[in-house]
Image (cartoon, helix red, strand yellow):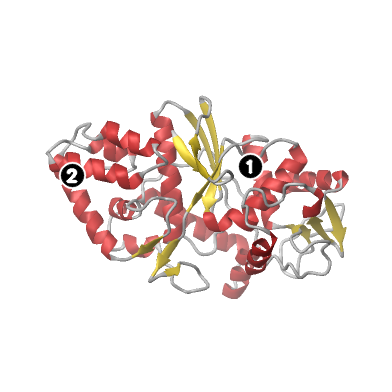
C-alpha cells in the first residue's frame, strides 16, 4: 500500500506490522455531524477496511474532545451543561456514523478521562524546561525544540496567521514566542476545573490529544490522521509536545483529508454553510450519502452539491442490479492500495456492474452494503 505522507510531501510505502495503530482526531461534540466530519471518517473507515482485508489487526482510536473552548462557549450560549451538550451531540454523531456503515473504533476515549495523564505530561515538560508558567498559564516553549514546524512546513509567518485564526492568540504578551501554545489555563467562572500543582484550571486543546494517543497506543503511532485544517496548529503542536516528553517519533505516517466546500466556500460554522448528515438522512439512505462522499480523492478539496446524491442513488441502483459476486474486487483493492484512490475504485466497480458482474464484495470493501 502507498499513501501520501504529509510530513514528507509525497506518496510513500505504508508498511506497518501485523498490528496497525491509527489515531484520528475526532469531534468536539457541539455541532455534529456535518459533511466535513463525514468525509473524513469515511476515508479512514475505508483505510481501516482495506487494512483488515489485508490481514492486519487494526487498533483505530478516534477521540472525543469533551472539554474545549468551543464546546464550553456553545454550552453557555444554549444554557446547558457542557457534558449534557457533549452527550447529545455524541449520540447524534454515533447514529450518523452507524447510518454511514462506519466500523466502530477500537477505542473512543474522552478528553475528560485523561486529566491525570495530562497533568503528568505537563509536569514532565516543565521539568525538562520545554514548558513554562506565565501568569498562571502553562505554555509550551516552541523555541526549546529544534524542529517545530517541520510537520506542516508552512513557515513562521503562515503559522502565525493560522494560530491567530484558531484563537491561539500569538499576540499574547505572556508568551515568550508568538507560536507558544497553551498546555493549561485557569478556568473562568462556571467552567470545569481540576487541581494541579501549578494552579487549578483546565487543559489546552492540543495536550488532550497527545495524552489520549499516548495512553491508548503508546509513544509511536503507525498512522495519525484528521482533516487538513488540523495540520497547523493542532497536529504540529501535538507532535512537538509528544516527542518532547517521550523522545520518540509521535507518528510514522501523517495523513490528512482535504476540505469540503459548499458553493465554492469552505464548509465551516463561521461561514454558516454547514450541511448535516442527519438532515440528509431524512431524505436519503446512508449508503447513498456514503457513495456521494466517495467520488472525490481524499487529498483534493471538492465542492458539495445535492446533485451528488442523485448520482450516488443511480450508481447504487446499478450496483444492486448487478447482484452478488467478486467482480472488480481485485481492481478495487489495487485502487485503494494506490493512495486510497476511491474514484478509481468506483470506476472499476461501475465497469464490472455494467457488464453484469456481481460487485457486492467490492462494494463491501468500500463500506457499501448492497
**Percent coordinates x, y for residue 329 in the rendering:** 27, 33
**Percent coordinates x, y for residue 360 in the rendering:** 23, 37
Label count reads 2
Give me the residue at 34% from left, 51% from top: 294
Give me the residue at 64% from left, 35% from top: 220
Q: Secondary structure at mark 2?
A: helix
Mark 2 neighbour class, 10 Å CA radius: few under 14, some 14 to 19, many 20 or more: some
Give the residue at the far left of this rendering: 356
Mark 2 / mark 1, whichever is N-terminal? 1
Q: Would residue 346 appear left or right of 200 to someone viewing this image?
A: left
| Closest to the observer, 84 or 64 | 64
Q: Which residue is mark 2?
A: 320
Question: Image quadrant of residue 82?
Answer: bottom right
**Percent coordinates x, y for residue 365 in the rendering:** 33, 37
**Percent coordinates x, y for residue 123 in the rendering:** 83, 46
Q: Would residue 193 appear left or right of 260 to someone viewing this image?
A: right
Label 2 to label 1: alpha-carbon separation: 40 Å
Give me the residue at 65% from left, 44% from top: 212
Q: Would residue 134 appear left or right of 160 to someone viewing this image?
A: right
Residue contact at pointers 2 and 1, CB within 8 angstroms = no
**Quadrant, the C terminus:** top left
Q: Would residue 124 appear left or right of 47 to someone viewing this image?
A: right
Whether residue 95 is visible here, answered yes or no, is no
Q: Which residue is mark 1?
A: 213
**Quadrant, the N terminus:** top left
Mark 1 neighbour class, 10 Å CA radius: few under 14, some 14 to 19, many 20 or more: many
Whether residue 50 is visible here, answered yes or no, is yes
256 vs 330: above or below: below
Amino acid at each position: 500500500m502507498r499513501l501520501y505522507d504529509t510530513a514528507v510531501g509525497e506518496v510513500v510505502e505504508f508498511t506497518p506490522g501485523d498490528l496497525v495503530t491509527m489515531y484520528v482526531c475526532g469531534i468536539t461534540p457541539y455541532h455534529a455531524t456535518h459533511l466535513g466530519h463525514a468525509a473524513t471518517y469515511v476515508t479512514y473507515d475505508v483505510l481501516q477496511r482495506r487494512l483488515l482485508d489485508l490481514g492486519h489487526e487494526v487498533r483505530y482510536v478516534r477521540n472525543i474532545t469533551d472539554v474545549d473552548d468551543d464546546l464550553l462557549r456553545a454550552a453557555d450560549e444554549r444554557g446547558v451543561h457542557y457534558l449534557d451538550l457533549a452527550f447529545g451531540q455524541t449520540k447524534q454523531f454515533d447514529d450518523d456514523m452507524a447510518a454511514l456503515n462506519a466500523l466502530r473504533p477500537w477505542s473512543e476515549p474522552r478528553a475528560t478521562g485523561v486529566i491525570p495523564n495530562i497533568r503528568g505530561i505537563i509536569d514532565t515538560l516543565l521539568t525538562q524546561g520545554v514548558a513554562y508558567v506565565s501568569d498562571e498559564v502553562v505554555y509550551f516553549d516552541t523555541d526549546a525544540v529544534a524542529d517545530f514546524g517541520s510537520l506542516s512546513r508552512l513557515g513562521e509567518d503562515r503559522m502565525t496567521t493560522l494560530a491567530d485564526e484558531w484563537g491561539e492568540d500569538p499576540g499574547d504578551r505572556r508568551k515568550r514566542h508568538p507560536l507558544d501554545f497553551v498546555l493549561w489555563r485557569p478556568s473562568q467562572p462556571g467552567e470545569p476545573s481540576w487541581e494541579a500543582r501549578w494552579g487549578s484550571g483546565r487543559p489546552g486543546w492540543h495536550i488532550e490529544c497527545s495524552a489520549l494517543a499516548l495512553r491508548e497506543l503508546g509513544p509511536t503511532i503507525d498512522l495519525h490522521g484528521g482533516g487538513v485544517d488540523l495540520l497547523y496548529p493542532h497536529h504540529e503542536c501535538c507532535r512537538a509536545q509528544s516527542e518532547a516528553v517521550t523522545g520518540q517519533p509521535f507518528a510514522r505516517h501523517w495523513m490528512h483529508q482535504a476540505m469540503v466546500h459548499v458553493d465554492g466556500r469552505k464548509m465551516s460554522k463561521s461561514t454558516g454553510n454547514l450541511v448535516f448528515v442527519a438532515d440528509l438522512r431524512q431524505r436519503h439512505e446512508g449508503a447513498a450519502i456514503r457513495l456521494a462522499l466517495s467520488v472525490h480523492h481524499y487529498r483534493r478539496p471538492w465542492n458539495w452539491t445535492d446533485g451528488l446524491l442523485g448520482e450516488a442513488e443511480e450508481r447504487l441502483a446499478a450496483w444492486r442490479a448487478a447482484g452478488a459476486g467478486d467482480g472488480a474486487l481485485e481492481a478495487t483493492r489495487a485502487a485503494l492500495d494506490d493512495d486510497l484512490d476511491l474514484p478509481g475504485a468506483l470506476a472499476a466497480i461501475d465497469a464490472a456492474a455494467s457488464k453484469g458482474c456481481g460487485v457486492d464484495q467490492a462494494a463491501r470493501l468500500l463500506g457499501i452494503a448492497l
